[in-house]
Image: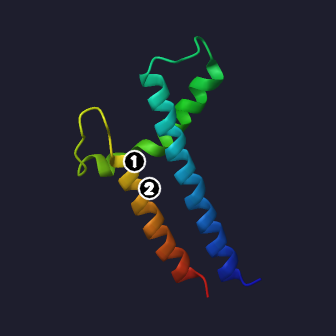
């Protein structure tokens, strides 16, 4: 396998993992906004802190431009869409 193909596969995998982190943060924040939360769970707080710290800086960029529709935040959908488009272009540019 060529090095460029391996790098393109790696970048594609990173984009997939980051997309999954964003989706996990959106689902977790939705669940907790409904009031479902296990009390005194250190491991779940660590996971939530990680997901928030990873996804919020990227989502904050889109929250400036995408208006909220009442309680619904559409910025994660726009952010994931942009990530997939830019990621696909980068992977195609890298791969031979």
Q: Nearer the viewer, residue 2 or 17?
A: 17
Check the image and name the residue furthest to the bottom.
96
Q: Where 21 sits versus 36, above or below?
A: below
Q: Position of residue 80 (x, y in %)?
A: 44, 55
- The residue positioned 65% from the left and 82% from the top of the image is 4
Q: How is the image coloured?
A: rainbow
- The residue positioned 67% from the left and 80% from the top of the image is 5
- The residue positioned 73% from the left and 84% from the top of the image is 2
Quarter of the image for the C terminus: give it. bottom right
Label annotation for residue 76: 1
Q: Where 26 sits versus 91, above or below?
A: above
Left or right: 13 as drawn, with respect to 76: right
Q: Position of residue 19 (x, y in %)?
A: 53, 53
Label annotation for residue 80: 2
- The residue positioned 61% from the left and 25% from the top of the image is 44
Q: How busy is the neighbourhood of tag 2: few (under 14 within 10 Å), some, or many (20 plus)?
A: many
Q: Position of residue 91 (x, y in %)?
A: 55, 75
Q: How busy is the neighbourhood of tag 1: few (under 14 within 10 Å), some, or many (20 plus)?
A: many
Q: Are marks 2 and 1 in contact (CB under 8 Å)?
A: yes
Q: Position of residue 1 (x, y in %)?
A: 77, 83
Left or right: 80 as drawn, with respect to 15: left
């Amino acid at each position: 396998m060529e090095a460029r193909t391996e790098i393109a596969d790696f970048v594609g995998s990173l984009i997939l993992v980051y997309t999954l982190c964003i989706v996990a943060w959106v689902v977790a924040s939705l669940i907790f906004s409904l009031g479902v939360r296990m009390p005194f769970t250190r491991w779940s707080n660590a996971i939530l802190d990680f997901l928030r710290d990873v996804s919020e800086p990227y989502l904050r960029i889109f929250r400036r431009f995408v208006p909220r529709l009442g309680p619904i935040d559409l910025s994660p959908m726009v952010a994931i869409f942009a990530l997939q488009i830019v990621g696909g272009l980068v992977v195609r540019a890298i791969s031979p």
